[in-house]
Amino acid sequence: MDLILNSISLPIIAGVVCLFIPGRFKGIFEAVGIVITFITFIITVLLFGIPYSSGFFLQDNLSRFIVLGIGLFGFLIALYSIGYMKGRPKLKEYYSYFLITIGASIGAVLSNHIILLLVFWGILGLTLYLLVGLGGPEASGTAKKTFIMIGGSDVLMILGLSIVWFLGRSFIMSDILITIKGGMSTVAFICLAIAAFTKAGVMPFHTWVPDCAEKAPIPVVALLPASLDKLVGIYLLGRISMDMFIMNKAMGQVLMISGGFTIIAAVMMAMVQHDFRRLLGYHAVSQVGYMVLGIGTGSAIGIAGGLFHMLNNVIYKSCLFLGCGAVRQKTGTTDMDKLGGLSAFMPVTFVTFLIAALSISGVPPLNGFVSKWMIYQGIVELGKNGDSLWILWLVIAMFGSALTLASFVKLIHAVFMGRREDKTAVKEVTPAMWVPMVVLASLCVVFGVLAFIVPLNNYIFPAVPGVLFTGMLSPSLVTMMLLLGVGLGLVIYLISNLKSIRQDSQSYIGGEILTAENRVTGKDFYLTIKDFKILKILYNAAEKKLFDIYELFKHFIFFTIGILSYLHSGLLPSYVSWVVAGLMILLVVLMKEFN
């Protein structure tokens, strides 16, 4: 119990204390951030092997590896922030909100009491708003949008948990098990699912994610939309789907439809982006679709794949955003048309980014391949159980991986390959920034090659018992085949290059020198897909924000706020009249109950 309280209270108290430290002390906030997040990470390591259950907190096989992930990613992002945030304004506020977010995230995952969960969940919504707002004036609109969308889903979460309490007659989440049948249980599950969807960024509740990716400070994006929000959001979805509700086929189909649509729609949006950060933001949305799809299968292998993909996504997506931040710091831009040729100047950033990009694309032997393979097999299990739509879900999942790889080919070519027209000197970032990227890229490899030895047997399988691999090929066999092919290709390459090769400083197309005007950047490589008639209509609608829930309901929201502001007049007789009216309504409801 003491370790649990320390893991939550230590970063929160340190974050509050930071607000009262004078800003003139140089380096104090960075030191507090590193020390506190490191101690918190050590505490989460010690917590990992200690099961605990009470009326307030629950440390079980599902929550323990997520808490460990929060501790690790919090420390890595704090380390990265030393280099990226150096010299930027409002460092006191940044590290304060950062630390409070770490503690509240651990608290939300370990909460076993409905009220306690809502408290920590609300704190996370507030710190997300504050952290995004640190991006400056251009981020203020995004911060407001994020706050309203997360706040709106929080209202549904309160409604859902209220129904859960009414049906389960308990505030203790581990004591609640509700069969989804009838209206109230269905409404409760959908409300909680929407709260999880919005937090994690599932379509159509996703639009705050790419906006944050583009406007918020890169460490904030790597910490929240790419990491903690995914862990907390999918944790909630997994908790309600596996432990609090007995799922039925209809709700499983709802999850799979949401997941499948998110995979394809988000990756299609990513393919036509010009901004480095916004492209990664849409990929962060697309990958959540795989998690929801896996959980929606209802099979042990599919759920395990969804949870493993949640963990893998946090690893490679954080690495990608940190690489993006490194490029932005050294070049001053994330416009892909202004980048190129950075692999020679930033080799560590390039290699780590390439590993993460291959991982998110599901290329073996990296971790993204293993978790996607598990989801594929969970979908195959649906077919064995008589679901006629299983082939559709499988095609969507595999096609989404192909499109992901295609868009990252575009991105890597535009940013790291090709010719660099800007002759300004560029060099690799400091160790404080590249060490976290190396750690995350290494985890992509370790969690792929040693998937069964390290993450699955220790983290995932204990949370989802009864997992069995099916199908003709195993991930290990596919990995060995790939390594064999790479080895043969390397041998052929070395043999063919034994003779000397003429080198030239010029680039040629059809025998003519490639000029700056004809330089291929990769930015416009896939824009031809916008010319397809149906896709053109959809892309135009997306550009007009016709699919943005926030934009569609913004005027209604502000109209409602205006009415409430008018009613909130500050006059005591007005408040008394509202109290009396509320009491009369409660009286009528109670009279009907007794009758």
Image: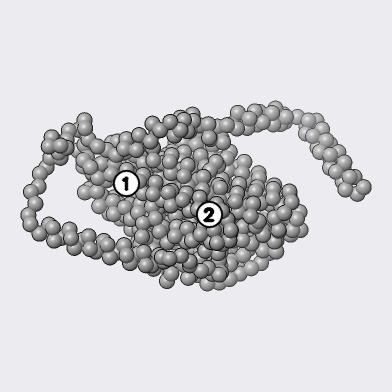
**Vertical side of 564 occupied by 475: above or below:** below
Q: Is residue 412 visible?
A: yes
How many other residues sit within 10 Å of disc 1, few (<14), some (14-19) or many (≥20)?
Answer: some
In percent of width and height, residue 20 lies at 51, 48
Q: Please give the residue where the numbered disc 1 appears in the rendered image.
A: 409
| Residue type at the position of mark 2 | Trp
Name the residue at 71% across, 58% down: 179
Q: Are marks 1 and 2 in contact (CB under 8 Å)?
A: no
| Residue 3, disc | none
Residue found farthest to the right: 595
N-term-proximal mark, 1 vs 2: 2
Name the residue at 61% across, 46% down: 194
521 or 141, which is in the foreground?
A: 521
Q: Is residue 427 visible?
A: no
Q: Quadrant of residue 510?
A: top left
160 or 570, which is in the foreground?
A: 160
In percent of width and height, residue 583 lies at 84, 40
| Residue type at the position of mark 1 | Val
**Vertical side of 46 occupied by 12: above or below:** above
Q: Quadrant of residue 449?
A: bottom left
282 on left or right of 573: left
In percent of width and height, residue 191 lies at 65, 47
170 on left or right of 509: right
Name the residue at 22% across, 48% down: 345
214 on left or right of 350: right
In percent of width and height, residue 387 lies at 58, 56
Q: CA distance from mark 1 to mark 2?
A: 29 Å
Q: Say which of marks 1 and 2 sits in front.
A: 2
| Residue 390, disc | 2
**Vertical side of 199 occupied by 50: above or below:** below
